[in-house]
Image (cartoon, rainbow, N blue to C red):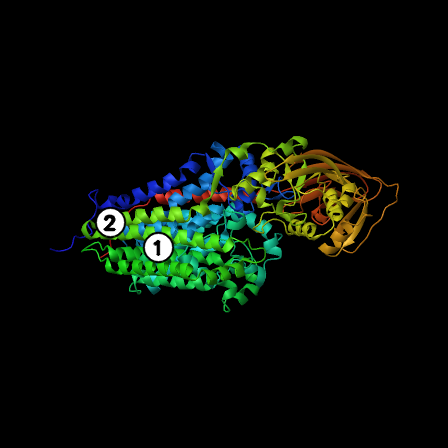
């Protein structure tokens, strides 16, 4: 009797994907239900402290019909629309107009997570694979540790979702029967990639698409008949994203990343250490990032002393087995997939690859860091190879060929058992290795606990492997059912083993206003000395926490009025540049100079000269620094207290200075600014070498008549020339006029704004021109309409003979 064939499910050929997709999608939706319902929120890494902090004021401006070029709540006023990491033009911004900030923020994550398997599914279909195999590859991509790690990055998850879909659309375009629809699809996805938060991901997508076309079509892929519609699609996509690109260009040169960049040392933070390969087999091998204290992540020596950029790169046992079942490359798709895996690993090694690290010293590469981002190539390549392995195991015609997958899974089981035996039989040797890499202050039970956690992970992995084995056994008699069960077991295993990297917390604690806000005035400038260790290392003592979960740090940040909590209440928060390096270079340097100072008095003088009214601290100020402040109150937080100090003599929002102290570089500006003799009421530090003085009786004045985030109108009256000092971050977006005549916008007191005015009475205006924004928006709308026209009017091409 012959073996049963891998028949299409009874739902019909076109519904075959649903047969495999529905169970795993339901499983994924069930795991996400607390977040989808709005009861819980993601809390790890940048979700709250970076992305919510940026999105809330942006959404409030949009709700009032404003298109904000500047975010006035952050860092003295930082770029808004120009910073792609805030996704200012991405479609999910509409969610903030109809729902609460927490739900809208989290919806951006789970919507893309649910879309990701379909995007990678389209890639498999574009390479000619069947629907079941394509879905298997899509699920392996979406549930990989690499993709689930994007749940910590609002500015990456959208791009990582659309990369495989973009490659699929480009592959589809030359062979599409409706060429206009294909052009519209490529252009639309390309625009979404450009708007998705990280221009580097869009560049990666273009590289992957180009290599895919060359791998499949060779020189034929370079024909004019192919390149012309592709160029049209790319051009229209760029024009749709033009407002983002134009504003990004306006701020890039003055940003930390554009002006200073990253050298080979900083630029290779996030390199893939060869030891990290063990995490391909054992998820969370180096500890759990969602825990604190003894159960915390301990693998910093293998991550350049920093927390891992992507919390896990674990692909899953079925994904590894299917890649092994794909065998040696026999088709263009397989060659392309294996090339991506090899090339991505080569580049992700970063500083551990002697051929790659020197490239980061080139000027063009100094805006780049985190080579592990190249793991995108590995993840896409493995997803396609998994789809090929699935198709080889369950061919569309003929009986299943389970031997290759079975052997691959059996080999993985042998590795898991072998690792478990090493831990059980050589606990002393393994424990010594752990202690050696844990560093100083190793708790007495650390090694034992960690080995116990490894054994528990191996046990769960072996249980998943057993489930995969049962599904393979079922596939001998019922191929379709067994194949579908393989994917369900894989999905369940990934959601369990990688649960820590999608850590959530109840939303309710973050909706309670911090008691600190009661003693502050909405709209004033504040700073938290504990945030980013601005006033020295200020780590929380985990022994006083209710338990070791990371969520207690997030709840403590809410109570201590960290930026994401403060901006929702209308406060302006200084010394909090976003971490991607696209805020003002000078603002970043000012923050670093404050944190590097070892004198609280210096720090407080600088904050006061920058117009900051209150300082929040989780440690009391030293006695010598209290002369600059007035103690206000203390409030309980999670495991510690937060103290509120009023900074005495803080500079007003706008002031007039008659004397200029020159500074030829930022360190000189800092030294003059924090000198005890510096008088902010009449003196200002400006770049240059020319010093000006004024009679002691000279007293200029400035009166503000209009104060808006992007417009400030004032009148000055002074017997001598002077400088209007404005407590806003110096940005290239600003323009200024005195009596209608343009004047230079200078960096005052290191990173605030200074405008020189002559003696007498004058009308002064500081503003952000919006002409380029308006023009780019019109062009974007026209390009979007063109894409729609191409899609709706597309007609099937006549077959050629």
Task: Tell me the SS state at disc 1.
Answer: helix
Figure check: 588 above or below 267: above
* Mark 2 Cα-neighbour bin, 10 Å: few <14, some 14–19, many ≥20: many
Name the quarter where the N terminus is drawn.
bottom left
Q: Which quadrant is home to the C terminus?
A: bottom left
Q: Name the residue carrying label 1.
A: 317
310 or 742: nearer the viewer? 310
Q: Residue furthest top?
A: 518
In the image, residue 410 lies at what x, y percent? Answer: 30, 59
Most foreground residue, 619 or 799? 619
Percent of width and height locating residue 221: 35, 61
Residue situated furthest left in the rendering: 1
Is the residue under label 2 in contact with that under label 1 (CB below 8 Å)? no
Horizontal side, residue 115 vs residue 661: left or right = left
Q: Is residue 308 visible?
A: no
Residue 335, above or below 717:
below
Residue 21: horizontal and vertical position, in percent?
Answer: 30, 44
Q: Position of residue 427 (x, y in %)?
A: 45, 60
Taking the spot 31% from the left edge, 62% from the top edge, the residue there is 332
Residue 638, which numbered label?
A: none
Circle 2 is placed at which residue position?
482
**Disc 1 versus disc 2: distance between alpha carbons?**
16 Å
Report the residue at 45% width, 49% height from top: 149
255 or 369, which lies in front? 369
Crowding around mark 1 (Cα neighbors within 10 Å: few <14, some 14 to 19, many 20+) is many
Instruction: Specify whether 795 is left or right of 568.
Output: left
Q: Earlier in the sequence, mark 1 or mark 2?
A: 1
């Amino acid at each position: 009797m012959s073996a049963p064939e891998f028949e299409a499910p009874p739902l019909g050929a076109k519904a075959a994907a649903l047969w495999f997709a529905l169970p795993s999608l339901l499983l994924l939706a069930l795991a996400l239900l607390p977040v989808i319902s709005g009861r819980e929120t993601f809390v790890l890494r940048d979700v709250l402290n970076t992305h919510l902090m940026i999105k809330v004021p942006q959404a409030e401006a949009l709700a009032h019909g404003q298109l904000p070029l500047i975010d006035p709540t952050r860092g003295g006023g930082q770029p808004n629309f120009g910073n792609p990491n805030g996704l200012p033009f991405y479609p999910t911004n509409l969610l903030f107009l109809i729902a609460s900030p927490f739900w809208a923020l989290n919806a951006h994550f789970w919507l893309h997570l649910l879309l990701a398997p379909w995007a990678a599914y389209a890639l498999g279909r574009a390479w000619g694979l069947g629907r079941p195999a394509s879905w298997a590859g899509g699920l392996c991509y979406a549930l990989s540790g690499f993709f689930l790690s994007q749940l910590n990055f609002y500015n990456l998850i959208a791009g990582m979702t659309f990369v495989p879909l973009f490659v699929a659309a480009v592959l589809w375009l030359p062979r599409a029967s409706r060429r206009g629809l294909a052009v519209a699809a490529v252009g639309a996805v390309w625009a979404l990639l450009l708007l998705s938060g990280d221009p580097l991901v869009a560049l990666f997508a273009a590289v992957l698409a180009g290599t895919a076309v060359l791998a499949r079509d060779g020189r034929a892929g370079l024909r004019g008949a192919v390149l012309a519609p592709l160029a049209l699609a790319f051009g229209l996509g760029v024009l749709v994203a033009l407002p983002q690109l134009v504003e990004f260009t306006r701020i890039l040169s003055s940003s930390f990343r554009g002006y200073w960049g990253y050298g080979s040392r900083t630029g290779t933070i996030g390199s893939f250490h060869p030891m990290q390969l063990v995490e391909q087999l054992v998820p969370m091998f180096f500890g759990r990032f969602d825990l604190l204290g003894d159960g915390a992540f301990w693998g910093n020596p293998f991550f350049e002393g920093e927390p891992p950029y992507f919390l896990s790169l674990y692909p899953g046992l079925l994904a590894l087995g299917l890649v092994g079942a794909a065998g040696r490359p026999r088709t263009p798709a397989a060659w392309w997939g294996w090339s991506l895996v090899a090339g991505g690993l080569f580049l992700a090694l970063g500083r551990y690859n002697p051929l790659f690290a020197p490239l980061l010293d080139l000027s063009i590469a100094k805006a780049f860091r985190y080579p592990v981002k190249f793991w995108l190539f590995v993840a896409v390549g493995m997803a396609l190879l998994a789809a090929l392995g699935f198709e080889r195991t369950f061919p569309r015609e003929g009986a299943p060929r389970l031997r290759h997958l079975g052997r691959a899974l059996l080999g993985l089981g042998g590795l898991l058992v072998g690792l478990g035996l090493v831990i059980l039989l050589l606990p002393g040797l393994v424990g010594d290795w752990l202690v050696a890499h844990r560093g100083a202050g190793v708790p007495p039970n650390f090694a034992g606990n960690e080995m116990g956690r490894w054994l528990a992970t191996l046990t769960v992995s072996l249980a998943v492997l057993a489930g995969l084995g049962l599904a393979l056994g079922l596939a001998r008699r019922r191929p379709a059912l067994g194949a579908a069960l393989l994917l369900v077991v894989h999905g369940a295993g990934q959601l369990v083993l990688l649960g820590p990297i999608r850590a959530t917390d109840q939303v309710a604690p973050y909706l309670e206003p911090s008691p600190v806000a009661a003693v502050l005035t909405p709209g004033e400038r504040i700073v938290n000395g504990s945030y980013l260790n601005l006033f020295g290392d200020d780590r929380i003592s985990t022994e006083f926490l209710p338990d070791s979960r990371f969520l207690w740090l997030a709840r403590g940040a809410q109570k201590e009025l960290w930026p994401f909590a403060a901006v929702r209440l209308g406060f302006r928060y200084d010394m909090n540049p976003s971490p991607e390096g696209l805020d003002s270079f000078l603002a970043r340097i000012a923050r670093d100079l404050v944190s590097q100072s070892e004198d609280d008095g210096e720090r407080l003088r600088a904050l006061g000269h920058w117009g900051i009214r209150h300082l929040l601290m989780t440690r009391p100020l030293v006695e010598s620094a209290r002369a600059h402040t007035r103690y206000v109150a203390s409030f309980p937080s999670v495991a510690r207290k937060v103290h509120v100090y009023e900074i005495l003599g803080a500079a007003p929002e706008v002031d007039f200075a008659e004397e200029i102290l020159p500074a030829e570089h930022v360190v000189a500006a800092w030294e003059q600014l924090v000198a005890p003799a510096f008088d902010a009421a009449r003196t200002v530090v400006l770049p240059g070498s020319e010093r000006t003085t004024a009679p002691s009786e000279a007293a200029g004045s400035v009166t503000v008549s209009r104060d808006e985030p992007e417009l400030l109108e004032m009148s000055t009256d002074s017997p001598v020339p002077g400088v209007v000092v404005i407590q806003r971050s110096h940005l290239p977006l600003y323009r200024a006029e005195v009596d209608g005549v343009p004047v230079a916008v200078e960096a005052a007191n290191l990173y605030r704004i200074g405008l020189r005015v002559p003696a007498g009475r004058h009308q002064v205006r500081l503003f952000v021109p919006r002409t380029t924004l308006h023009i780019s928006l019109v062009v974007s709308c026209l390009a979007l309409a063109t894409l729609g026209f191409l899609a709706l009017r597309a007609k099937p091409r006549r077959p050629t003979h």
